[in-house]
Image (spheres, rainbow, N blue to C red):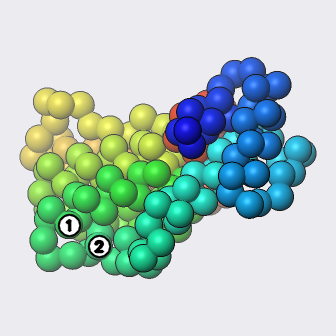
Amino acid sequence: MFRGLLALVRGLDPALAEVAARRLAALAGLPHDPAAGPAAWATLYAVWWWRAARPERDLSQALAQLAHDNPSARFRAAQELALLPLPVVRDALSTALGREPLPWVTRALLDALSAVTGEDLRARADLAGEALRAHVQAVRLRLSEMASEGRAGRAPGTPAQDR
């Protein structure tokens, strides 16, 4: 039910977004701010859902997994953090991307960053070796530009902002 309501909040119909946001606010026990708008609502409820689905886990634990010795743990952390469109998540994923030696984990980090920022930052499937490293450097430059612009990212599924 939550995912369906969140999809409506992210949708193109403002009236449906408002109704879905009010319902999510009631489910989450949070106040509804009509002036905030669909992007803010989607972020708020995505974060609420992430926390509600993982009551035993906090954000610092998930972020710490990005530096784990086990590459599978880093891969899973990237997948988990892709749900959270927050500046701290974007920055942690960018840092992890800069030090990741394994291409399959690098691709997971790029996928997560695409979800968090709303920009397609993924690498083409045929990129490998130096070409993949060059793509990673270009992505990290774009992320630093986003940070300096004050753009936090957006909830997955919401339209990307014009630059």
x then y, percent, for residue 155: 58, 45
Q: Is 76 left, or right, of 159 in this rendering?
A: left
- Say which quarter of the image contains residue 125: top left
> Is 143 left or right of 9, judged from the image as shown?
left
Q: Is residue 19 visible?
A: yes
Q: What secondary structure is found at the residue carrying circle 2?
A: helix
The amino acid type, in three-letter code, at marker 1 is: Ala
Q: Which residue is mark 2?
A: 65
**Is residue 121 toward the left or the right of residue 35 in the image?**
left
Front residue of this view, candidates 128 and 119? 119
> Within 10 angstroms of label 1, few (less than 14), some, or many (20 or more) residues?
some
Q: Earlier in the sequence, mark 1 or mark 2?
A: 2
Horizontal arrangement in the rendering, residue 142 relative to residue 66 (left or right): right
Question: Which residue is found at the position 42% from the left and 42% from the top?
Answer: 114
- 118 lies above or below 144: above
At a point 45% along the width and 43% down the height, the residue shown is: 115
In the image shown, does 69 or 52 lie closer to the viewer? 52
Give the x, y percent position of residue 74. Answer: 23, 65
Please, what secondary structure does the residue beneath circle 1 have? Answer: helix
Q: In front here: 143 or 46?
A: 46
Q: Position of residue 48 (x, y in %)?
A: 60, 60
Report if the CB atoms under discs 1 and 2 are less than 8 Å apart: yes
Q: Amino acid at mark 2?
A: Gln
Residue 147 visible at all: no
Q: Which residue is mark 1?
A: 73
Q: Quadrant of the N terminus?
A: top right
Q: Is residue 69 above or below residue 98?
A: below
Q: CA separation, marks 1 and 2? A: 6 Å
